Image (cartoon, rainbow, N blue to C red):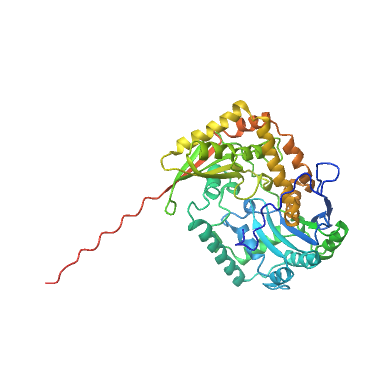
Amino acid sequence: MRMTRLSALAAGLLLTFGSAHAASTDTWKVPVAVKKLDNGLTVVVSEDHSSPTVGVSVVYHVGMRLEPQNRTGFAHLFEHLMFEGTPTAPKGTFDRVIQGGGGTFNGSTRADYTNYIASAPAGALEPILWLEADRMKTLDFSEKNLANQQNVVKEEIRVNVKNQPYGLFFWTDLNNLAFDKWANKHDGYGSFKDLDHASIEDVKTFHDTFYQPANAVIGIAGDVTPAQAFELAQKYFGSIPSRAVPERPDVSEPLNTKERRAEQTDALAKVPALAVGWKVPERGSKDQIPMMVLSQLLVGDDASRLYQGMVKGREQLLRIGGGVNYPLGSSMDYAGPSQLVLHAMYKPNATPDQVLASINEEIAKINKDGVDDATLARVKTKMLSEWYGGLESFLNRANTLAKLQTLWGSADVVNQVPDWIQHVSSDDLKRVAHTYLTDANRSVIVRVPAAPTPAKAPATATKAL
């Protein structure tokens, strides 16, 4: 969640099944080669010589869910600190080396991981890996750098939350309402109080604990062979000592058994809005992929059931958005509890209960009748197109492989997802809708414009005698 060095975390060019990547069949298999170094670092390589470029993603298995208590936003803060330089490569070196060679880079923080990505001509792979290894070893831990990035993160919060209508309430506030364990419910963006209390010792401990080979995966995609990539990884990362990774806490939570609801006012909002979340299946369960398909069906695009039924049909909503784990990625981007989230701005002549009743009507249709073959095929085709399209970009491919290796334990999941999507049936959608999209498992926040502050009456003038 850096302020924007790169906007290309979204999907790349669409890839049709008839592309040059598909030989005699309609299925494109992503090349995947994996090697684990002696110090625990895992390297995943996808060889592709269609362009003389490479994408690199370094994923650390730590995110907002594992940051220290009373240090909300610490994982996000630390992501910023990673760009403040090292004793060997001072601040600005990263920019000059990568951007000076025509490349781009970025970093982001999610619930279960933090990633650092770069895209550049193939000849820049070696200096990129040198830079990444250098900051895995240590950072320039100084009071000046810490204070600077504390202020940067606070300004980001002001811009994206405090001074924005609705202020990401459908993420931060809804998680706080829906979940019970601190790891799942706290605001990962961060509070000013907690950010200000972060110390140099906190930063060093965090780096020593989580930013180390045994807790990292490097994804490399593009114009390089696995042998070349593994050799470079060994050269630059192989000597970094591994440390014990702390045992991960149990963050699992059951489905909720009673609706949770909250009401808020917003001084910047012009129309009322609401956010609705349902706890979703755990990662790797038989219901996860059907829930992905159901999410696309309900709110994936302008052809979705809720857009057509409530924006176009009933004309209750001005706009609607959502998805699994929104706005922090897709359903493949989490290793702990998450939600299917819908957020919408509704017309002032509608009530929250009317909007919720309309949502329930659309869900009830799926519970009762399932989905016809043509609709299900359309939804799957769109999902497959987006999945393959995202992998066409070397940057996105490297990032996807590194994330899958980190969260699923296998980068080859990249080649299994399309088949999983294809095998989702209408009965599967009925089952997950009936199990998860219930009122009892639902959390709702209603956010309405604050009443205008009455203008002060003019002071009474006193005429001098």
The location of residue 453, given as percent across then percent down, is 34, 55
Residue 227 visible to an observer of this rendering = yes
Residue that lies at the very extreme toward the right in this rendered image: 227
**Figure quadrant of the N terminus:** bottom right
Q: Foreground residue, 202 or 16?
A: 16
Horizontal side of 238 relative to 187 (left or right) equals right
Q: Foreground residue, 16 or 39?
A: 16
Q: Foreground residue, 61 or 171?
A: 171
Residue 258 visible to an observer of this rendering = no
Residue 147 placement: quadrant: bottom right
Residue that lies at the very extreme toward the top in this rendered image: 368
Residue 46 placement: quadrant: bottom right
The location of residue 65, given as percent across then percent down, is 63, 50
Horizontal side of 321 relative to 423 (left or right) equals left
At horizontal 57% and vertical 65% (from top left) the residue drawn is 152
The location of residue 444, given as percent across then percent down, is 50, 41
The location of residue 454, given as percent across then percent down, is 31, 55
Horizontal side of 163 relative to 453 (left or right) equals right
Classify 446 as above or below 135. above
**Figure quadrant of the C terminus:** bottom left
